[in-house]
Image: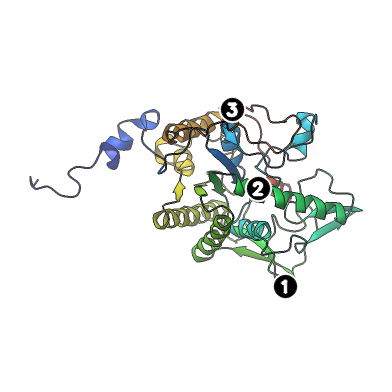
């Protein structure tokens, strides 16, 4: 071997597979992520995205950090009822945001570029369901008007969670989605699976590609920064596989395709934008070192030990050395009465609309 210096000569141990992965093993992994920003000790976080994003919000709350709850439950609402009505799950009652196209729609409504009344309201047996979040109320709304008012409240809260955040954390979940072929509206889930009625002439399947997803995310982030110019964005990819695929592929192949595209998009965006960062929750759970040991027997749900493992790396890499803001409360809360959020264990079930697709499995 030549004794001449090369670009590889001074690399740290973590740059080599043997010393960075094979020798330390899963429990010795270190330096997987280090935040590219020094944040204030009381930095304010908004969290959104797919099901796995809920673990991040719970971990922030458990550590008494400033997680933004911009649409809290009514005062004195019992915890079980509040959760059933999707309060305290994300920073506003958006429900899961599975695709970049959904995020762009919500951001357009929050910025004033789209009328919040435009997306469909479905009716079924005298009840109304918001096509953007059809399971947000367990039994639907009493009327279309009530559904519209609830959506408007959510959009306003979503904007507040952008305005008041230091960091907007978004967990990318899926590339597959459904749209209205006539209006272009993206749906939270295929119409007819949990609410609404499927119409093959109107409803089309979309498996968004790299270019579309990157464009949608960058457009959404530009709108967010028009609201809050100082906003930093932290991306991550959910390690949770697809419940089902409409792509025609085997679900394992479809999952790999989706996660690979999302991971590639996140990487490209972060390389181009210093105010965007990426946390490797996907790699931590699905990477070779862990040998799939953090998945439950269904090979889809992440076990509590896996969630804790991910959060350990998250907080180890989070840089909160910029000093705290004088006089700012640790918790940001927009309800003048008492707050509802309690510390939640990682073992608690997450709210996941996509899992409803399993009910359609005839096998």
Of mark 3 and mark 2, the one earlier in the sequence is 3
**Image x and y of residue 335, in percent:** 73, 36
Of residues 200 and 63, the one drawn nearer to the viewer in this rendering: 63
Of all residues, the one furthest to the front in this rendering is: 326
- Cβ atoms at labels 3 and 2 below 8 Å apart: no
Would you place residue 345 above or below residue 273 in this image? above
Of mark 1 and mark 3, the one earlier in the sequence is 3
Would you place residue 302 above or below residue 193 in this image? above
Say which quadrant the N terminus sits in.
top left
Disc assigned to residue 182: 1
Would you place residue 181 above or below residue 153 in this image? below
Of residues 37 and 17, the one drawn nearer to the viewer in this rendering: 37
**Which residue is at a point 71% across and 52% down the rendered structure image?**
155
Of all residues, the one furthest to the right in this rendering is: 126
On screen, residue 201 versus residue 36, left or right, reads: right
SS assignment at label 2 = helix
- Is residue 361 visible to the viewer in this orientation of the structure? no
SS assignment at label 3 = helix
Of mark 2 and mark 1, the one earlier in the sequence is 2
Alpha carbons under labels 3 and 2: distance apart? 22 Å
Mark 3 Cα within 10 Å, few/some/many (few <14, many 20+)?
Answer: some
**Image x and y of residue 15, in percent:** 28, 42
Mark 1 Cα within 10 Å, few/some/many (few <14, many 20+)?
Answer: few
- Cβ atoms at labels 2 and 1 below 8 Å apart: no
- Residue occupied by mark 2: 160
- Residue occupied by mark 3: 62
Nearest to viewer (mark 1 / mark 3)? 3
């Amino acid at each position: 071997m030549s004794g001449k210096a090369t670009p590889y000569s001074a690399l740290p141990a973590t740059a080599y597979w043997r010393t960075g992965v094979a020798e330390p093993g899963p429990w010795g992994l270190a330096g997987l992520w280090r935040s590219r920003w020094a944040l204030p000790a009381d930095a304010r976080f908004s969290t959104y995205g797919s099901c796995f994003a809920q673990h991040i919000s719970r971990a922030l709350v458990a550590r008494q950090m400033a997680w933004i709850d911009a649409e809290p439950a009514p005062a004195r609402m019992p915890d079980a009822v509040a959760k059933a009505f999707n309060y305290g799950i994300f920073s506003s009652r958006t429900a899961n945001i599975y695709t970049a196209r959904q995020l762009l729609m919500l951001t357009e409504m929050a910025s004033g570029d789209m009328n919040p009344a435009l997306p469909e309201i479905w009716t079924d047996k005298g009840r109304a369901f918001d096509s953007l979040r059809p399971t947000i109320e367990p039994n639907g709304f009493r009327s279309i008007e009530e559904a519209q008012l609830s959506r408007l409240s959510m959009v306003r809260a979503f904007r507040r969670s952008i305005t008041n955040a230091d960091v907007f954390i978004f967990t990318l979940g899926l590339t597959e989605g459904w749209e209205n072929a006539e209006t272009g509206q993206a749906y939270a889930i295929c119409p007819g699976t949990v609410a609404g009625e499927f119409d093959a002439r109107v409803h089309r399947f979309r498996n968004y590609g790299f270019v579309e997803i990157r464009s949608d995310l960058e457009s959404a982030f530009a709108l967010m920064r028009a609201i809050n110019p100082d906003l930093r964005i932290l991306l991550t990819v959910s390690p949770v596989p697809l419940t089902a695929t409409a792509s025609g592929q085997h679900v394992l192949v479809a999952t790999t395709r989706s996660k690979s595209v999302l991971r590639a998009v996140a990487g490209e965006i972060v390389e181009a934008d210093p105010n965007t960062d990426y946390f490797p929750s996907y790699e931590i759970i699905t990477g070779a070192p862990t040998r799939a040991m953090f998945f439950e027997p269904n090979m889809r749900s992440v076990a509590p030990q896996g969630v804790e493992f991910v959060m350990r790396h998250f907080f180890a890499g989070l840089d909160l050395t910029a000093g705290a803001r004088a006089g700012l409360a640790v918790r940001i809360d927009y309800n003048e009465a008492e707050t509802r959020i309690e510390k939640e264990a990682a073992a608690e079930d997450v709210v996941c609309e996509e899992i409803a697709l399993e009910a359609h499995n005839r096998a």
